[in-house]
Image (spheres, rainbow, N blue to C red):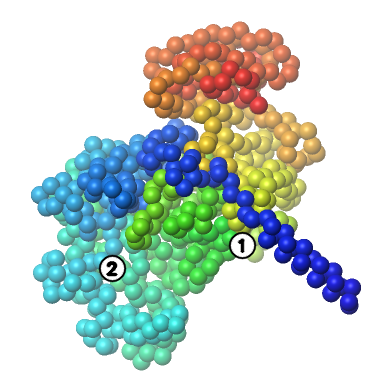
Amino acid sequence: MKLLFSKAFLFCFISLFYFQSSPPQKDPKQYPKGMENPTLRGLDQLKKYPLPRYRPGHTLSYLFNWMDPFYMGEGGQPGVERDDAVKRSEFVQQELCLHWHYGIVIPNIDFAFNITGEGHCPPYVQLANEHPEIPLHFITSWLFSEPNLIGYPYTKAMVQNTDLNPAWSATFNFYGNDLKQIKFNFPDSLIRIDGAVTKYHISRLLKWLTRPVDVINEDGEEPPGPYQLPYLKKDPIMIRMKDSMKIDSWEDFMAIRKLHMRNVYAAAFMKTLPELKNTRYSLYGTEGGPINCFKWSIMKKCQTPVNGIYYSTPDFYPRWPKNWKDWSGPWHGWRWIDIGRKVEIKDGDYLFSPFVAAGWSSNPEDDIRPGQWLGLLKCLSVIGAEYYYVGYFNLGAPFTNPSQYVWQAAMPAYAQAITSRFEDVLRNGNVLFEKDGTPRITWSTEDPHVLIAVRKHNKKDKYIICGTYQPFSNDAAEIPEKRNVTIQLDGKELSFEIRRQGSVYVYEKTTDGKTLFYQLDKWHENAHPDYWSDDFNFEAEVGDSDISNAELTTVHTGAEGDYKNYTTSLNMLENKEYEYRCVIRDSVPEKRFLWIRYKGKGTLTVQSMKAKGETKRVALPDTTQWSWYKLESSFYPEGVKLCNAKGAIELDRLVISKLGVEPK
């Protein structure tokens, strides 16, 4: 006993000494260049980042911007005039919608005319009219309705008004504070007033628009909430109302009433404005989460379904690296999503659209960093996230400079672009299920830092596997950036590498007996995008033209299922063109080299993807080993098209680089 005590005491002493003498190591590459004083302004950073590589022809919904372009345009920053911030915010919107797959957003319809005033076109409307091919998004906020604007004697939303009739509201204790809110018997006539205010604001905008509104997203935090349940059970008025409706379950009663109230509000504009007949309506926080959520099977119907699917809108706001795995109060990490997705998928809703934010602290060192965040977003995609509502919250002065957080707009686009490369499995597949029919959202391993998600095609032996190696702090020394893992899949062991920034693999058993394994996101880096490579790295099998399984081959050195060391290559068919698209945004064009890693022998036609781009014919030297071949040229600003004119050529990688040095 004394010996055990001595060892324990010694361990604690050594640990204390170690942690005191070893302060956290901050990785500069997880922050913008310049750290506390970034070298580039937020918009200029976006223009320098490598662009996401969406697969041409994909049909994924556009990202929804909840970051507020005004603050992204440096609104509220010292020395920045309001008019200058508004103009810069228009450039931010243009950059996001033209290059990052974002819709154009009117961030708050209530305040849309505050800057220009009545009789003038509000900011962003002209951009929306110029680009009808890009979806237009509105954000509405029921809680901020001002009925006095349309002639009523009330300055705050009716659902905020608890002084009209004592029978319509209740006072209860909520996390130690007395809270007074309306109840589920609040009259429809008063709810319609709030809806009419929203209709008023939308109607003013419609007068300036020459194109449709694609999505309206409501803030969705209006009372009453499901947390009222303990108090409703003691309320005679609520008891009588529930009994009169012949509903046994209190949870069903609350969801049915809340659904009715939301539908009454939305009908005031969605059903009465003909311009919105094809507009989709969604509400924040409509989900199957574990606590303080209305019953999903009922509440989901307050939203517009897409192809028969109701997209849940949970928030994935871990805020801090330590919170990614679980949740803390209102800040939801992965386990919250895991529980909610099981409910939603069991109800048939296999796709969803979460709200996401990596943190919004005044000290960026508190927030989740880019590499970790990208890995988490990719896992959300594999469990069904078609698109994201991308948030950052400027809660009050002093406002964080957007140069510290504009990267949070880029990461969802990088993740969704990878999703576009497995869209067939996203739409025609699902997560796997346990024997009892429970959806399997998370694949456990022995390491608590590992997160793995898997999705399978409904009709093929084709899987998408995403793994990320997650820290619980921003200490660069906590864990390595990557590790090898092993999971049980389809009755077999499967081993592969996962990285901090996520590793997304295709694992497929083809009908002709082959097994394929390859990575979709190998070019992504564990760093702030300021530091990402200027090179364009392409795996030959991840191109922008249709490639059949017959053209691919995977070779690995380990046992069956061991893909820690493997090569998947493209066996080029004669006279077939293979496209690899990219966008080079250099303000001053620079000479680049095209490096091709291949084996075999043949004549290759190399053509620029740019309109009327030049073409070269190259006789590749005969080689039975993987070898690099270099072409010197400056004609690859939009990518390259390859064609095997003659011979047998096996292709592994392509790199478009400024360097004349052989790639690693």
Looking at the rendered image, the quarter that the N terminus falls into is bottom right
Nearer to me, 177 or 415: 177
Kind of residue sitting beneath label 2: Leu
- Label 2 crowding class (10 Å Cα cut-off): few <14, some 14-19, many 20+? some
Q: Residue at x 56, y 62 (%)?
A: 323
**Residue 437: which disc?**
1
Nearer to me, 7 or 450: 7
Q: Residue at x 55, y 42 (%)?
A: 29
Q: Is residue 68 visible?
A: yes
Looking at the rendered image, the quarter that the C terminus falls into is top right
Q: Residue at x 19, y 64 (%)?
A: 197
Q: Position of residue 349 (x, y in %)?
A: 48, 57
Nearer to me, 240 or 201: 201
Residue 568 falls left or right of residue 562: left
Q: Position of residue 241 (x, y in %)?
A: 34, 85
Residue 306 falls left or right of residue 12: left
Q: Point out the frontmost of discs 2 and 1.
A: 2
Nearer to me, 88 or 623: 88
- Is the residue 337 above or below the residue 414 in the image? below
**Residue 143: which disc?**
2
Q: CA distance from mark 2 to mark 1?
A: 40 Å
Say which element carries label 2.
Answer: helix
Ranked by sequence position, the earlier of labels 2 and 1 is 2
Q: Position of residue 558 (x, y in %)?
A: 79, 37
Q: Is residue 578 visible?
A: no
Q: Residue at x 51, y 29 (%)?
A: 534
Residue 295 falls left or right of residue 558: left
Say which element carries label 1.
Answer: loop
Q: Are marks 2 and 1 in contact (CB under 8 Å)?
A: no
Kind of residue sitting beneath label 1: Gly
Q: Position of residue 160 (x, y in %)?
A: 27, 75
**Residue 611: which disc?**
none
